[in-house]
Image: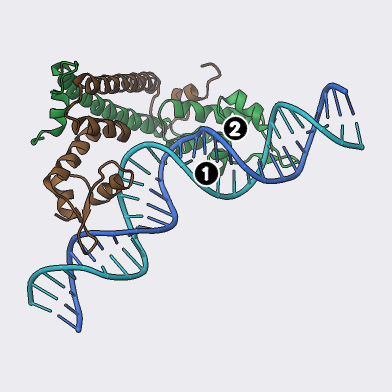
Chain colours: A green, B brown, C cyan, D blue
Amino acid sequence: MNIGEAARQSGLPAKTIRFYEEIGLIQPTRRLDNNYRDYDTRDVHRLRFVARARALGFSVEQCRELLALYGDRQRASADVKAIALQHIAEIDQRIAELEAMKGTLQTLAARCHGDERPDCPILEGLAREGG
Amino acid sequence: MNIGEAARQSGLPAKTIRFYEEIGLIQPTRRLDNNYRDYDTRDVHRLRFVARARALGFSVEQCRELLALYGDRQRASADVKAIALQHIAEIDQRIAELEAMKGTLQTLAARCHGDERPDCPILEGLAREGG
DNA sequence: CCTTGACCTTCCAGGAGCCGGAAGCACGAA
DNA sequence: TTCGTGCTTCCGGCTCCTGGAAGGTCAAGG
């Protein structure tokens, strides 16, 4: 099938599929005589695999590792789990950062009148000396 | 003061300060005869203001708006609050996405043995047909 | 047979928010 | 004078694509 069909079936834009090929993520696409890329269902499976991994927040490099494990029948599930757990830890970290920001912002916003007057604890909070 | 000192006092790398100038965020730096940038405490205040806003997750464009309001004595605190509340909403959105990813990952990871055997619910989850 | 339109190809630029490094002045102390 | 540090500009790269231009291909319609 052509790239458009592979895009439809995988949920990835054609542009993205080409990009993944360029960086060597989803590699060996055959070419037809007209130089069009030709995908089979196996390729589509791999594309969907990557699409889902990306949707779960894995980096492209992590996807590369996962894809390698996916295609390795001798893999140890421990290797997969290690990547997943590390990613969960990164997500936790990110959530904690966002919660901290949110907490600060909510505190400031709660003290701000939000009317036409110029005095504003939010701006004061951003401008303050300490912290 | 030179850019190095401004960097020290604001907590921003000199590179970043130059970048902010280039994109017109912190503009009017005078130049000395030797072409060195020259900062005063007012500039440093603005730099720190931006540093803090960035640390709270505001985009550079939001920082630009906040900085304009910061320097506008006729501002309405409602305008500031609107930006802050919108940002909080974005953070909430982002947290929700991360929590969803985390939930899926934890479910998958919990079912993975994590040993030397190849069968792995995580990979199966990424490869599955549905969803 | 020619045109139209949808597809495919490659390549180049950009966006967000910087960071690293190279090449080349400027400055202060020894 | 020389050394070391700091400043200048410019260019490239990072992540992960996305948009667009210029051009080849293909199937259908007139």
**Three-letter code for the amino acid on which mark 1 is drawn:** Ile
Q: Nearer the viewer, mark 1 or mark 2?
A: 2
* Side (left or right) of D15 relative to B64: right
Helix, strand or loop under label 1: loop
Helix, strand or loop under label 2: helix
Q: Mark 2: few, some, or many residues within 10 Å (few <14, many ≥20)?
A: some
* Side (left or right) of A8 relative to B117: right
- Residue drawn at (52%, 44%) of the image: A23
Residue A14 is marked as 2
**Three-letter code for the amino acid on which mark 2 is drawn:** Ala
- Residue drawn at (13%, 23%) of the image: A119
Sequence-first tag of 1 and 2 = 2
Position in image of residue A98 (x %, y %): 26, 26
Are the residues at dot 1 and dot 2 in contact (C-beta closer than 8 Å)?
Answer: no
Position in image of residue B94 (x %, y %): 34, 23
Q: Is residue A67 visible?
A: yes
* Side (left or right) of B48 relative to A26: left
Position in image of residue D21 (x %, y %): 62, 42
Q: Is residue B78 above or below residue B65?
A: above
Position in image of residue A29 (x %, y %): 64, 39
Q: Is residue B52 above or below residue B85?
A: below
Q: Mark 1: few, some, or many residues within 10 Å (few <14, many ≥20)?
A: few
- Residue drawn at (17%, 56%) of the image: B2
The answer to which of A131 and D23 lies nearer the viewer is: D23
Q: CA distance from mark 1 to mark 2?
A: 14 Å
Q: Is residue A79 above or below residue B75?
A: below
* Side (left or right) of B73 relative to C23: left
Residue labelled with disc 1: A23
- Residue drawn at (54%, 34%) of the image: A71
Q: Is residue A41 visible?
A: no
